[in-house]
Amino acid sequence: MIHESTDRSTGAFCSQCGTTIGPGDRFCPACGAVQGVTCPSCGALASGTARVCPDCGGPLPVPRPLLSDVEQTRSAARWSGRGFRLLVGAAACLLIVLAAVAWIYFSAPERQREQPISRVAAAAPLTLAIRPGTPSLALIGTPSGVLVSVDQGMTWQQMLLEGGVRAIGAGPSDASPVYLAGAHLWRGEAHGFQQVTTDLPVGSIQALAVDPSQANRVYAVVAGRGLYRSDDAGQHWVPLGSEVPSNVTSLALVGSAHPLFFAGTSQQGIFASDDGRAWANASGFVNGALPTQDVLALAYDPRSGDRYVSPTGETLSGALYAGTNAGLFKSIDEGRSWASLPFHRPISALAVSPAGDHLMLAVDLDGNIYRSRDGGVTWR
């Protein structure tokens, strides 16, 4: 039998947790630890404070000493520190979970949809161009004239021009003239256009494009006649080819020394030509084909940062964009394949800044203006 004193000085406390135990307690009432020590010689159970076996007189193992008040305080402090670290770790995990939930919430497709920055009260079809400068000028051709913006599409000012504007051609620098075609042909700056006397039936012009290497060289698609070129800023024109696809909505030039022509159409997709005479399909093939033949706008960005090496080793740079009734598409291999961009509203007009700042503006069929500053990736 174990004999323990109830006086703490004699050690009548649990050797594991320090709880007071009774003289006959075999187990600690608090932690359940076995009390006393076992004699290694005869196996008798002796008091935890005994040093010799009461049965055989043999020496007993020395039990683990009780924790002093200071040691108990230190032990409690260590456990408190561990608890604090566990709490901090749990809080950090919770913050990570909340951040993940927030990312999922704000990156949901319905929150990534394009958001308009302004709206113009003009009926489609429209045409759009951006001329670089400080500030850059954005121009929208409308049935009553042209709208001009100097704050990247946030606000617009109306400039009335007789017969309206159906096509706009803008050069790659602020020194390049801007051409407007409608019932007449105009040339000049955004705040002052002069009518050009020309030998071209301007009332039938469907699309314009300015040569990026020569400011006075401009191309025009004339309904029923084909592709024309002027080398004197629109006064005199020479025909390049009459086999231009019908229903042309837009014209874009890729390259400068020997430009490649791209024509968007409203019912036949996109066509390309290297001489303005023979035209071939440029709507892509198989998995890279455009999903629609209704192309309302084309825009080329020579400084998009894209690079493509063809199977023959030819290196291409820049990107061609197509605004369609199914949204926005991009090609970096001269129309051999097209990839969808995250703009899925029908596009009436489209323009890219040639300044290399990745600025892009788009207009939908309702006159809403959308702006992207990363080459068409986001429109918020």
Image (cartoon, grey):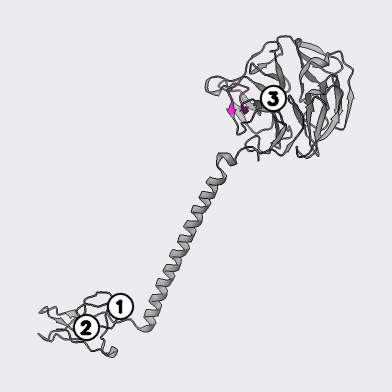
Q: Which residue is mark 1?
A: 17
Tally the marks.
3
SS assignment at label 3 = strand
Place of residue 160 in the rendered image (x, y in percent of width and height, measured from the top left): 86, 28
Above or below, 107 relative to 264: below
Q: Which residue is mark 3?
A: 297
Above or below, 68 relative to 216: below
Magenta-highlighted residues:
326-339
Disc 2 crowd, CA 10 A, few/some/many (<14, 14-19, 20+): many
Place of residue 123 in the rendered image (x, y in percent of width and height, measured from the top left): 75, 27
Residue 170 in view, yes or no: no
- The mark that comes first in sequence, 3 or 2, is 2
Q: Residue 360: say if magenta.
A: no
- The mark that comes first in sequence, 1 or 2, is 1
Evaluate if marks 1 and 2 touch, with contact meaning CB atoms under 8 Å apart.
Answer: no
Q: Nearer the viewer, residue 380 or 285?
A: 380
- The mark that comes first in sequence, 3 or 1, is 1
Q: Residue 328: say if magenta.
A: yes
Place of residue 29 in the rendered image (x, y in percent of width and height, measured from the top left): 25, 77
**Quadrant assignment, res 182:** top right
